[in-house]
Image (cartoon, rainbow, N blue to C red):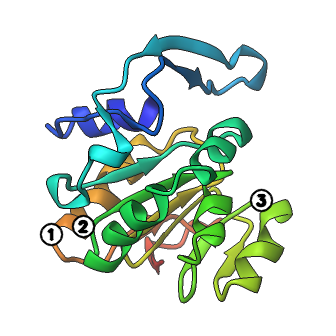
Amino acid sequence: MQAQDALISLGVDCRLISPENSLIRGWNENKAPSSSCWGADYAPDRALDKSIAGDYDVLVIPGGIRSITKLKLSESVKPFISAFMQTGKPVIAYNQAIDLLSFAGLVEGYSLAAKSDLCDSVKGHGGRCAASEFIVSKNLITLSRFRDVDDRLQRAVLCILNGERYIEKEVSSDNMPYASKVA
């Protein structure tokens, strides 16, 4: 839901697509892990098998083992995600969603922010893995967790939509002037 909030603040009209017609429970990841909790229930706006990737500009794939396991069972998932990847539209993938991208064979040539338990799968499918919380590689934005990245996520999505490279500015530890880090 944090990604949806970040996109809505950019003026993006968000739709919830699901392979199931039942309510979907959101997860609220807070800065303090002990205060993270299950959030509200949301009704899907459209069924995945009735959705066309061309109707949307950005794809957010939620994390969580339960969500990803359910998505892997849907025959409609791979073609839907593949359409976003092939057309260069922004794809935002959280933690376990990286497993879904590997499962679908869609990580080759990409760098991904992944926890160590997912790196073998990423590398086995031709991707590169880094122990980072946020990586933008071409049109793929991967996050190993969602904390304090609203601004970076928004900038990355806007760069991809505008056909620009995402460049992250960061201050070095020895107080040097800003140095660009290209992802």
**Residue beneath label 1, please?**
162
Give the residue pinned by disc 2: 159
- Residues at badges 1 and 2 in contact (C-beta under 8 Å)? yes
Q: Residues within 10 Å of mark 1 (few under 14, many from 20)?
A: few
- How many discs appear? 3
Disc 3, SS:
loop
Regarding mark 1 in the picture, which secondary structure is present there? loop
Q: Secondary structure at mark 2?
A: helix
- How many C-alpha atoms fall within 10 Å of the one at disc 3: few (<14), some, or many (≥20)? some
Question: Label for residue 115?
Answer: 3
Q: Disc 1 versus disc 2: distance between alpha carbons?
A: 5 Å
* Residue 40 to residue 31: above or below: above
Residue type at mark 1: give it: Asn
Q: Position of residue 127 (x, y in %)?
A: 64, 83
The residue depicted at 47 percent of the width and 17 percent of the height is 23
| Separation of marks 3 and 2 at Cα, in angstroms | 25 Å
Seen from the viewer's position, the closer of residues 23 and 162 is 23
User: Which quarter of the figure has residue 33?
Assistant: top right
Q: Considering only order in the chain, which callout, 3 or 1, is on the residue closer to the N terminus?
A: 3
Residue at x 14%, y 37% (from the top left corner): 11
For the point 29% across and 58% down, the residue is 157
Q: Which residue is at a point 43% across and 56% down the rendered structure image?
A: 76
